[in-house]
Amino acid sequence: MSRHIRHAGVFCALLLVALLVNAARVQFVRSSSYDDNPANRRASIVRYGQPRGDILIGGERVTGSRDTGEQLRYERSYADGPLYAAVTGFASQVYGTTLLEHTEDGVLSGTDPLLAPFPLWTDVTRALPAGGDVVTTLDAGAQRAAYQGLAGRKGAVAAVEPSTGRILALFSAPSYDPAVLSGNGPAAKEAWARLNADPDRPMLNRAVRQTYPPGSTFKVVTAAAALDAGVIGSLDTPTDSPDPYTLPGTRTHLANASDGCEDATLRDAFMWSCNTVFAKLGVDVGLRDMAATAEAFGFNATDLRVPFSVAPSTFDTSLDRAQLALSSIGQYNTRATPLQMAMVAAAVANGGQVRPPYLVERTTRRGGTTLAAAGPRPARQAMYPSTARRLRQLMTDVVRRGTGGNAAIPGATVGGKTGTAQHGIGNAGTPYAWFVSWAQGDRDPEPKVAVAVVVEDSAANRRDITGGGLAAPIARAVMEAVLTS
């Protein structure tokens, strides 16, 4: 009898060992396959079982977490959601994450290894540390000025600090409230369908994900290329430019919207935005040097992240001379994001140096201790410092005596360039109104802000659409907000 008991005991022991081995196999060897199984909701339950970290702007939390009491307990909430949607993006239990909510998801959700003081214990318990916070570079006043300026219109605003690349404002209109996508019920699905069906595309981030023909604002780049190449020696020397200008190798005549452009000096041509002068300058500079200057400003770069990705701004490098002439006035295949054109203005203000833009100042634990800090990235030289000084003169003249008078700010030096960009088949589309600028307070040692504004106003009379009329007042409001903050 005892022999049978021993056999049964051994058999039970073997069964126990087998169970332990299988449990170890499930827990450690096969754990990843179970984690990735769509039927396993444990990861989602853990992810939404605690409040998400927050995004801070101007020291204030613009995000939060709402306790629903459901299995996926916490939903994302937003303070002034439409004001900051182009920065925060959304965090949805159904549709995932975008923009900062996506690129900083590890910190915000608590899954970033830097948040775990004891990583091995965290792996065993499967518990998440408290989500951390993301501190942005945004200036709340500048962001609100952009929001108010674009109210009722389509367009975008990007503003940066020239000396560092810190993004001070980033707004896209029309906007939307990310909170409507946070949950997993029918309301979130209805909001998703409605937003995606909207012809105005409110979820498109026009500041960084939409490229436009920059029109005459690109003449800043063309002027820089001409001055750097020595094609122009003085701002006040006649440029030997005909009016109209016949595009090389064609019978097509390029004209101007203003008078006095024939043989105009660079100063006058820049002030009154003479197409003929800058088209000829681009041809005289040549494709190689024009492309090199554009790329030094950031055109054709495919790796710009702020930290979310930015659509590449483009300057075609395979042009004939007629196409080069049109590209040099910001038409043909030349396209730019508002953020890229803010970088162009910032380079002029910063002595010719381009600082790559960034949006995250630092990430912190929930208690406020710093996890990681960003800081300025290495600069590159887009043009000679002497060229930047002369371009600052040209841009200042535009505001003081030319087409950019609506951007003038008492007690500050403001430089700007207007643009009206044609687009569509046969240029039949309603033009885009552009304005790029920088501003320096009279008591500031250097320019504090550079701005780019683009307005798509299909309701306006085509003859009334100008960068100086529609876009410059918005840029002025954003710059004033920064200068007085």
Image: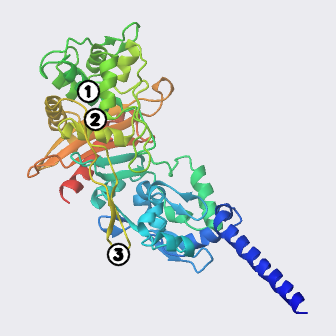
**Amino acid on which disc 2 is placed:** Thr
Residues under numbered marks 2 and 1 in contact, where contact means CB atoms less than 8 Å apart: yes
The CA distance from mark 3 to mark 2 is: 46 Å
Crowdedness of circle 1 by 10 Å Cα count: few (<14), some, many (20+)?
many
- The mark that comes first in sequence, 1 or 3, is 1
Picture layout, residue 44 above or below residue 375: below
Residue at the spot 18% in from the left edge and 54% down from the top edge: 483
Picture layout, residue 142 above or below residue 28: above
Res. 256 visible in picture: no
Secondary structure found at label 1: loop
Q: Quadrant of the C terminus?
A: bottom left
Picture layout, residue 310 above or below residue 52: above
Q: Label 1: which residue?
A: 273
Secondary structure found at label 3: loop
Residues under numbered marks 1 and 3 in contact, where contact means CB atoms less than 8 Å apart: no
Q: Quadrant of the N terminus?
A: bottom right
Q: Disc 3 or disc 2, which is closer to the eye?
A: 3
Q: Label 2: which residue?
A: 418
Res. 367 mark: 3
Residue at the spot 36% in from the left edge and 41% down from the top edge: 338
In the drawing, does residue 88 fall left or right of residue 190?
A: left
> Residue 392, located in which quarter of the rendered image?
top left
Residue 178 place in picture, x, y as percent:
50, 61
